[in-house]
Amino acid sequence: MKLAISLMLVLLFPFGVSADTLNGKVVKITDGDTLVVLDADNTQHKIRLSGIDAPETNQPFGKRSKEALSALVAGQRVEVDWHKLDRYGRIVGKVIAQGKDVNLAQVRTGMAWWYRKYANEQSLVDQGLYEAAEAKARVTGVGLWGDKDPIAPWDWRKR
């Protein structure tokens, strides 16, 4: 019986992945993929939006990407669904504001790339949504895709 229960748990929760939820108010926008949320205990949490990579602040479209994120969530209550901390101690998660996936909105409007390097950390549904959003943004030339030769942030940082 114990073996059957253990097997069932392993099948239901593969690889020990668990998620947490943080609720709070956005009190700061750092850039196009990072913000700060203040929780009910007045603790600030730095959040790195999962599944995307926005232009760096000193990179073309960096300021516009930050402004776009600010327009979406500044001062609003959000829910952050997360499962890890990055090497800088930031919570990495999907930000939901008024029922909308903010991370996806940044990709959809051409203010961020879908971060394929970390696609395995997204659900298959999200992978498909983010990939399609980026493809559409590219084709329609919205946001950074209107630039002749946009440089991905991961390439910009290597310079």
Image (cartoon, rainbow, N blue to C red):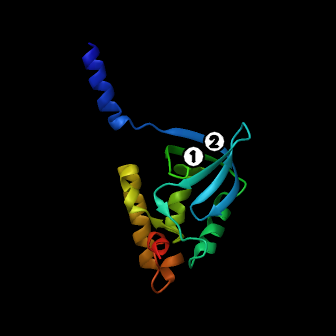
x, y percent for residue 109: 53, 69
Location of residue 29 in the rendering, given as x and y in whole percent from the top left corner: 67, 60
* Residue position marked by numbered label 2 in the rendering: 23
Q: Nearer the viewer, residue 56 or 130?
A: 56
Give the class, few, some or many, for how many residues have Cα within 10 Å of label 1's Cα (few <14, many ≥20): many
Instruction: Name the quadrant containing residue 30.
Output: bottom right
- Percent coordinates x, y for residue 97 in the rendering: 61, 51
Report the residue marked by disc 1.
Answer: 80
Residue at screen point 35% across, 33% down:
13
Q: CA distance from mark 1 to mark 2?
A: 6 Å
The structure residue drawn at horizontal position 41% and vertical position 59%, both measured from the top left corner, is 129
Q: Residue at x 56, y 79 (%)?
A: 60
| Residue 110 place in picture, x, y as percent | 51, 72
Work out whether 7 lies above or below 76. above
Front residue of 39/141: it is 39
Lower position in the chain sequence, tag 1 or tag 2 = 2
Count of numbered marks: 2
**Residue 43 relative to residue 88: left or right:** right
| Residue 142 visible in the current orientation | no
State yes or no: discs 1 and 2 in contact (Cβ < 8 Å): yes
Q: Amino acid at mark 2?
A: Asn
Mark 2 packing: few (<14 Cα in 10 Å), some, or many (20+)? some
Q: On the rendered image, what quadrant is the N terminus found in?
A: top left
